[in-house]
Amino acid sequence: MFVVKQKLELLNLLEEALPGPAPRGSGPRPADEDGASNGSDSKKLRVEEAPPSRVIHIRKLPNEASETEVIALGLPFGKVTNILTLKGKNQAFLEMGTEEAAITMVNYYTTVTPHIRNAPVFIQYSNHKELKTDATNQRTQAVLQAVSAVQSPSSDVQDVLAAVSSPVLRIIIDNMFYPVTLDVLQQIFSKFGTVMKIITFTKNNQFQALLQFSDPTNAHQAKLALDGQNIYNSCCTLRIDFSKLVNLNVKYNNDKSRDYTRPELPAGDGQPALDPTVAAFSKDSNSLLGKIPGALNPLSAAAAAAAAAGRVALAGQAGSSGVLLVSNLNEEMVTPQSLFTLFGVYGDVQRVKILYNKKDSALIQMSDSNQAQLAMSHLNGQKMYGKIIRVTLSKHQTVALPRDGLDDQGLTKDYANSPLHRFKKPGSKNFQNIFPPSATLHLSNIPDRKMALIQMSTVEEAIQALIDLHNYNMGANQHLRVSFSKSTI
């Protein structure tokens, strides 16, 4: 009975593959479309009105087209679960893992004509909901697993097929202004599947990495999503290719290489052993980068790099809110406004409270925990008004405002609606100018519309100048903008 059903299914597919008018799809118009119909009106209607299906009917294939090349058409849109080729008719049926993937594929190729061996092909929905061929066919399954290294939907077929199917990606970091660690890479790429191994190294003065997924499909998805993306805004750009290697040989677990499947590996001569807290950071789904669905957030990524470098608290430790505790302040000089201005360089400050019974300490509420981490990594240990300030994460989730009628002597300020927030506009150029405190200040919004650099004698003087002069009224409704610069004069 099973064999009979298979034969009937094949006959139905062959009938569907007979010449006839094309439904919604892409590629060249079949020759019989330009003249009178070669089939009955009922057949024409049936084909044209085929609803979306996860089975895709591909026509006008070149005589020499292979199964591998046909599968490559569907891989950018999702998992390909089955294929049937009709060599004599230059046609094929491709079954996608989901109907959504098939719809995405047909919609894309409606506007971008697909090609195989430089010949345009025609793609449409099939009348069948699934391919009931022998799913245990070893050759078909081997071909399906072999093709996973597709570069992009619009790539040339030959370029696509030249890449060897591999779960290993080669990653190059361009414009690496901030340090990128092995743990940061693991956090970013683990969104697309299980990361098995990572090896980092420097070649041609560029930081590079080899990263192995558990499955080639995950590597393909990660490459499509992340190639060309910035870990930080406007810097640390990911350049991703498939490696010719199919397996990485990792001998040591340290800050240069990691085998996540073998935690017992030694650290190697002269290398520090893997810190359990760092391992927890890399696996914790609540860690900084783990909170970012898909796209990379520059403030989040910068904070994650600081965490990986050991400069700030790791995820899972106390203080995951956006509130900072700043201590050892000069209580004779500090004001909520001065703290707002300084910490506002690294995020949008919402509220500031100088503690009534301990005026050398203050609570600062940032927009989110990522901004708090970033501000802490840059400002902890800096000098403000002659004293080295200490910045830590607070256990408080918010900074409370004083109760109505209670006079707290102006020690608490609400800046939620401040027009001076630097990062309230998505894509603002301010994201590109997040630098550690330095003796050189960048000035902008000067009345003659020019910018300037000013170098102070010390970082402390530069911090003081930024606090005093940021938003200074230059006249004619021009307010000076001051930020730290990476340049020197």
Image (spheres, rainbow, N blue to C red):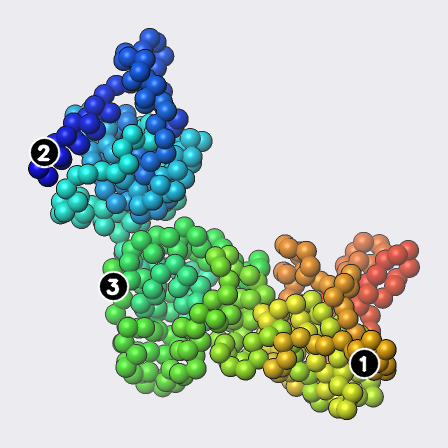
Q: Position of residue 449 (x, y in %)?
A: 81, 54
Viewer-nearest residue: 369 or 441: 369
Position of 438 relative to 300 (above/below): below
User: Which residue does the image show at 32% across and 13% down from the upper left?
Assistant: 41
Query: Which quadrant is home to the C terminus?
Result: bottom right
Which residue bears the numbered disc 2?
A: 4
User: Which residue does the image show at 25% across and 45% down from the upper left?
Assistant: 81
Front of the two marks 1 and 2:
2
Viewer-nearest residue: 269 or 403: 403
Q: Is label 1 in a helix, a strand or a loop?
A: loop
User: Which residue does the image show at 12% across and 32% down from the upper left?
Assistant: 7
Q: Quadrant of residue 341?
A: bottom right
Which residue bears the numbered disc 3?
A: 247
Residues under labels 3 and 2: Cα distance? 43 Å
Q: Is residue 485 left or right of 119 when viewed as pictured?
A: right
Which residue bears the numbered disc 1?
A: 411
Residues under labels 1 and 2: Cα distance? 84 Å
Whether residue 372 is visible: no
The kind of residue tagged 1 is Leu
